[in-house]
Image (tube, rainbow, N blue to C red):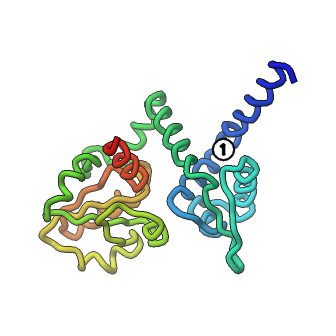
């Protein structure tokens, strides 16, 4: 093998990752799986795709060795093949945020609602959590909470908030978080809680951002 053949082979393998991530739906599936392992049925529902299309995209991710799966009775459960896939998603989002201004404008309008909702940055939460004036709720599905959550959070999935919000202390600010900066669950939870008379804010982070922040603080 000469140098040119070697480089063509290596860069071809590198490009496989870029090719499989060129699909918005496959990127979304990886984002969902970064929260917890999920069945094909759950992934289809969350991504608003048919079972057939979901399976097709998962096969492409499987071929690129970004995911793997195991069978659980009548279900096929997919998960990330390597924890470093989360870092890949982080890096791509970060570069896109820096280079494509429309991303930040869209998020500001849809997730943050302009200046209508109070947003708390992660570093500010680390200062607040030492006190007793706030309660942190995780509004993702409970399976994701069980897979990993921010220390001190309690699980109240957004679809169950209407049934359980009265259990929250009315004399404390409720801070909600979900899957990260591009997840709307926390926005919906804060809007609902404010309608019920609660003081509520959205945490500008999810579990992965929290873990990354902690890792950076420890270095």
Q: Which element carries disc 1, helix, strand or loop?
A: loop
Q: Which residue is mark 1?
A: 23
Q: How many marks?
A: 1
Q: Residue furthest right?
A: 1
Q: Is 21 positioned to the left or the right of 154 in the image?
A: right
Q: Farthest residue toward the top? A: 3
Q: Residue 56 location, x and y as percent?
A: 75, 56
Rendered view: 27 above or below 100:
below
Q: Is residue 20 above or below residue 146?
A: above
Residue 38 vertical placement versus 16 (above, below): below
Q: Position of residue 153 (x, y in %)?
A: 31, 66
Quadrant in which the N terminus appears? top right
Identify the residue at image location x=53%, y=48%.
Answer: 86
User: Which residue sits at x=26%, y=60%?
Assistant: 175
Nearer to us in this view, 107 or 76: 76
Q: Quadrant of residue 165?
A: bottom left
């Amino acid at each position: 093998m000469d140098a040119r053949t070697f480089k063509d082979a290596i860069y071809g393998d590198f490009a496989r990752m870029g090719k499989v991530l060129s699909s918005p739906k496959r990127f979304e599936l990886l984002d969902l799986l970064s929260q917890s392992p999920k069945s094909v049925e759950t992934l289809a529902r969350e991504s608003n795709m048919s079972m057939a299309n979901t399976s097709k995209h998962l096969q492409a991710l499987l071929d690129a060795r970004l995911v793997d799966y195991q069978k659980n009775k009548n279900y096929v459960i997919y998960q990330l093949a390597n924890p470093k896939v989360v870092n890949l998603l982080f890096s791509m989002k970060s570069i896109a945020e820096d280079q494509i201004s429309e991303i930040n404008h869209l998020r500001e309008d849809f997730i943050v609602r302009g200046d209508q909702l109070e947003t708390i940055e992660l570093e500010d939460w680390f200062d607040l959590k030492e006190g007793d004036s706030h309660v942190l709720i995780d509004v993702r599905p409970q399976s994701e909470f069980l897979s990993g959550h921010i220390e001190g959070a309690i699980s109240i999935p957004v679809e169950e908030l209407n049934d359980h919000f009265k259990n929250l202390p009315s004399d404390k600010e409720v801070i909600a978080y979900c899957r990260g900066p591009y997840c709307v669950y926390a926005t919906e939870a804060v809007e609902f809680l404010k309608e019920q008379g609660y003081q509520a804010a959205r945490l500008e982070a999810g579990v992965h951002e929290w873990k990354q922040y902690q890792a950076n603080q420890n270095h």
